[in-house]
Amino acid sequence: MREMLTETSETALIRRGKYGQRTNTTALKAAHTRLARDLVFDYAGGLAFNRAVSPADAKFLLGRFLARLDRALLGRDWAKAEHTTRTWLIAYLEQLASNPHYHFFANFPYRLPYKPSTQHYEKLVEQVWRKVVPGGSTDVTWIYDRNGAASYYTKELYRSDALENIVLSSEFWA
């Protein structure tokens, strides 16, 4: 599954623009809605900054958050872990002018013989996010309605700057 998530041919075509034309944001939203709906993500959520932040700073802070989260979940050698065992996340930055925040779909790793509860991940995500973004807030939930979550979390992909605001966790892997 993770190899498929690096970039689908459909998303790559949209990202580059078929025949060099401008990005088709309707097709982009449709492709990412299908991606979020059809792939097996267990969790969805939000990471709010609760302050003004640039897209570049938001992406930097998301990278810091993911590094700290993997450290908390996988231990001190988290950076040496196989990519397939790290946190897998696709995030969409939205509302830059008024309330910048990421919506995300994620699968979190675990080292225990059983999968921790949603409440465990809720607490951990909040603790780590607040260390990276003091005053920030979080929301993590188990995905129970894939179609609804996919449609809601990709709702702002119609904007012309949408491509720059999509982040894959694999962008931060060495």
Image: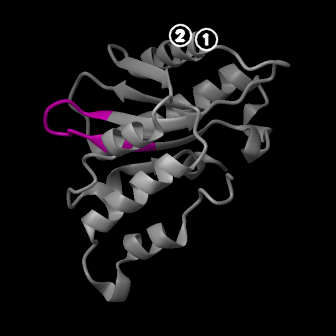
Give left or right: position of 135 versus 88. Answer: left
Please provide percent x and percent y for residue 92. Answer: 37, 44
Which residue is most to the bottom? 19
Residue 66 magenta-drawn?
no
Mark 1–mark 2 Cα distance, whole angstroms, equals 5 Å
The residue at 61%/43% (across/down) is: 40
Number of numbered callouts drawn? 2
Q: Which mark is on residue 131?
A: none
Q: How is the image coloured?
A: one colour
Query: Can you identify the residue that label 1 sits on?
Result: 120
Q: Mark 1 near mark 2, Cβ–Cβ under 8 Å?
A: yes
**Which element is circle 2 on?**
helix
Q: Name the quadrant containing residue 82.
A: top right
The residue at 67%/50% (across/down) is: 174
For the magenta stretch, what is the residue range?
Answer: 91-101
Q: Which mark is on residue 123?
A: 2
Please provide percent x and percent y for residue 9. Answer: 53, 73
The residue at 52%/15% (across/down) is: 122
